């Protein structure tokens, strides 16, 4: 039972993270910096894109910050796409 | 030792720079823009930090338009070769370094490019306009000569380029880090700079600022870290022009170098260097047989001189024996020597940084007098 609870907690925690796919590491860094300026923490990741273009960078962040992330990306003209939750 | 060859590369480097380069090499020198593990991410973060610092230094809001190169020569080649079109006419000043002249000469062979050299003396605006043809598409300018410190008014050149729709490429090798930058510098189409001269970075550092991303071709093709399945280089800057691994230590040194320059202040650096040029000018004027090729109030941080009888190489060898580093010859800029009239022997050039002092100039003068007495 304890194991089940832990597994569930882990799953919820994992579900809370979201990923946006950006493309180049420079734009990913630009996005990371802009998000950092408004207090949104993010992590650089290699993100498998929806359409396979080869290596692609993205950012992982807390799902609660989704709206802020969208606003910041639009404000700074950074092209992005959300990775669908079922994509590994 | 007295080091007076700062126009070739500044020495010494500020301690903070060597410390940070060492920290980079020992703590976080992953490959930037390849992996996403913490070391690669930290290296990538430093690169972006440096792009932001350079953009801010140039008063432009586009860090992604800063392309890292290993020196100004690479940046100039990149800018010229990616912009040139077959049959284009290029205008270059009579102060250009071989980093400009040689690529243009090669393009004249390869792409049927023609070129004219405009005089940087007198009315610069008229000098340029006189040479413009219907097929002129590019204007290249070196605002401060590496040979004499002769200055070209960059504001005027920018105005002419804008009015006549010429793609303006500027060689900032002896300009950046020595004087306040004019407003509107962001209107230069391509600004090329080494990191290891006036910006106090290490050798192997440099950058190219591109005003717009609408460049046509690539210069070097290879790994870019993203868009890997695309057979072409990515379209977005800066990756389009950064094939292969960027040197993180070199970029870190450039970052800290620019911070150092900004901390000291461009005005302070410029005044200090000009004061040393004036002092050396005054002293050399008092020795018979010498001719000074730099104006007394000359710009930049360099002073060129020659002796009517003694070859510049001999003077420099003698100075070196006395532990004074100066440079003789053509300084890779035959055009500038031709326009200054210093052909065929070239000059002796002394060039200063913020680390030089008037005491060093006094010692140099004393030693030079001694050399002339013995020769």
Image (spheres, rainbow, N blue to C red):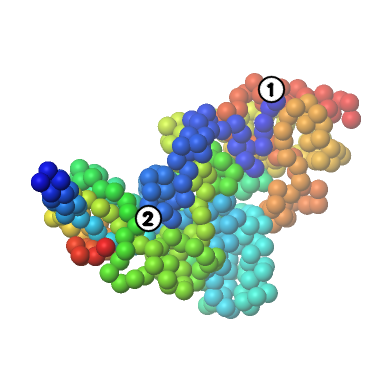
Q: Residue furthest front?
A: A1
Q: What's the distance in space between the residues labelled 1 and 2, CA to CA?
A: 49 Å
Check the image and report above or below for B173 versus B362.
Answer: below
Chain ID at mark 2: A
Dot 1 crowding, Cα within 10 Å, few <14, some 14–19, many 20+? some
**The C terminus of chain B is located in which quarter?**
top right
Check the image and report above or below for B82 versus B316.
Answer: below
Dot 2 crowding, Cα within 10 Å, few <14, some 14–19, many 20+? many
Check the image and report above or below for B174 versus B171.
Answer: above
Please give the residue where the numbered disc 1 appears in the rendered image.
Answer: B362
Would residue A76 appear left or right of B196 to someone viewing this image? left
Chain ID at mark 1: B
Element assignment for label 1: helix
Please give the residue where the numbered disc 2 appears in the rendered image.
Answer: A26
Residue A82: x percent and y percent? 22, 63
* Residue A47: assigned label: none
Would residue A55 appear left or right of B302 to someone viewing this image? left
**The N terminus of chain B is located in which quarter?**
top right
Residue B123: x percent and y percent? 56, 57
Mark closer to the observer (1, 2): 2
Nearest the eye: A40 or B114: A40
Element assignment for label 2: helix
Q: Is residue B23 visible?
A: yes
* Residue located 19% across and 52% down the image: A14
Nearest the eye: B28 or B81: B28
Residue B17: x percent and y percent? 50, 34
């Amino acid at each position: 039972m304890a194991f089940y609870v832990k597994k569930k907690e882990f799953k919820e925690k994992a579900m809370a993270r979201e990923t946006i796919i950006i493309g180049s590491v420079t734009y990913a860094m630009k996005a990371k910096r802009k998000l950092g300026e408004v207090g949104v923490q993010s992590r650089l990741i290699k993100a498998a894109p929806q359409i396979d273009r080869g290596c692609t960078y993205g950012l992982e962040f807390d799902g609660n910050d989704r709206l802020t992330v969208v606003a910041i990306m639009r404000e700074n003209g950074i092209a992005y796409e959300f990775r669908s939750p079922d994509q590994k | 030792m007295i080091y007076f060859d700062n126009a070739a590369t500044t020495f010494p480097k500020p301690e903070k720079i060597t410390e940070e380069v060492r920290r980079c090499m020992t703590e976080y020198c992953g490959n930037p823009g390849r992996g996403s593990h913490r070391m690669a991410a930290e290296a990538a973060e430093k690169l972006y930090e440096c792009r932001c610092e350079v953009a801010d230094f140039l008063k432009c809001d586009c860090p992604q338009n800063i392309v890292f190169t290993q020196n100004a020569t690479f940046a100039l080649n990149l800018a010229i070769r990616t912009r040139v079109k077959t049959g284009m006419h290029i205008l270059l000043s009579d102060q250009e370094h071989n980093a400009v002249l040689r690529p243009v000469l090669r393009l004249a062979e390869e792409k049927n490019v023609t070129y004219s050299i405009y005089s940087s003396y007198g009315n610069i605006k008229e000098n340029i306009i006189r040479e413009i043809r219907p097929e002129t598409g590019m204007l290249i300018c070196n605002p401060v000569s590496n040979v004499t410190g002769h200055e070209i008014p960059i504001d005027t050149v920018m105005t002419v380029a804008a009015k006549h729709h010429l793609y303006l490429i500027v060689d900032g090798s002896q300009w950046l880090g020595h004087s306040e930058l004019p407003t509107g510098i962001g209107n230069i189409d391509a600004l090329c700079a080494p990191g290891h001269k006036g910006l106090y970075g290490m050798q192997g550092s440099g950058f190219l600022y591109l005003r717009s991303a609408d460049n046509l071709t690539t210069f070097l093709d290879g790994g870019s870290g993203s868009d890997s399945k695309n057979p072409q280089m990515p379209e977005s800057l800066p990756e389009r022009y950064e094939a292969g691994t960027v040197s993180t230590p070199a970029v870190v040194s450039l970052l800290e170098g620019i911070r150092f320059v900004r901390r000291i202040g461009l005005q302070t650096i410029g005044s200090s260097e000009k004061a040393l040029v004036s002092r050396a000018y005054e002293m050399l004027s008092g020795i018979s047989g010498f001719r000074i090729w730099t104006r007394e109030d000359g710009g930049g941080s360099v002073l060129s001189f020659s002796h009517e009888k003694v070859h510049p190489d001999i003077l420099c060898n003698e100075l070196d024996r006395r532990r004074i580093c100066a440079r003789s010859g053509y300084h890779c800029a035959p055009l500038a020597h031709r326009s200054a009239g210093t052909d065929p022997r070239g000059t002796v050039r002394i060039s200063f940084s913020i680390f030089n002092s008037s005491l060093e100039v006094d010692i140099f003068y004393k030693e030079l007098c001694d050399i002339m007495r013995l020769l």
